[in-house]
Amino acid sequence: LVSQIPSKKKMKSLTNQLLGVKALLTLPKFIQDQYRPLMGEPLLIVEQLLIDVKIEWASKVIEQLSEDEYISYIDTYDCPTLEPRPSILLDEHINPFIYLLMFYAEKSLEFPLPSSS
């Protein structure tokens, strides 16, 4: 009986697949195939939508998945571009999609200052 209980890693993978399917179903049918390879990584779907400047679609996906009971299974380590920041990670329950948006908002404000030579 115990062998039938999925491991934590398997449960996380199944949850990511479920959320990925929900993310894809939120998108218009004509674009779903383009994002299907990312189905097992819901954060990467949102990240790619942001990169593709599909802001409205990203917003709909975030809204849809943020209401899902399984969102707590996603953590900010799931997205390779994110580095944990202690000040943000103090709140262990931060929505991973909000964290992703915060990351890109911070990156968009980074720019080199000209040196005064």
Image: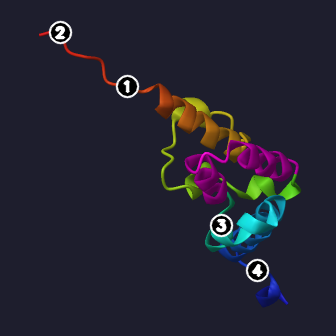
Quarter holding residue 5: bottom right
Q: Secondary structure at mark 2?
A: loop
Please report the residue visible at 78 percent of the width from the left and 52 percent of the height from the top: 61
Q: Amino acid at mark 3?
A: Tyr
Mark-to-mark CA distance, 3 and 4: 27 Å
Tell me, yes or no, whether the two marked residues, 4 and 1, touch with CB atoms within 8 Å.
no
Residue designated by label 1: 111
Q: Nearer the viewer, mark 4 or mark 2?
A: 2
Quarter holding residue 97: top right
Q: Amino acid at mark 4?
A: Pro
Please report the residue visible at 79 percent of the width from the left and 59 percent of the height from the top: 27
In the depicted view, which residue is nearer to us: 82 or 9? 82
| Magenta-colored span | 43-67
Q: Secondary structure at mark 1?
A: loop
First in sequence: mark 3 vs mark 4: 4
- Residue 110 vertical placement versus 36 (above, below): above
Q: Secondary structure at mark 4?
A: loop
Tell me, yes or no, whether the two marked residues, 4 and 2, touch with CB atoms within 8 Å.
no
Mark-to-mark CA distance, 4 and 2: 60 Å
Residue designated by label 4: 6
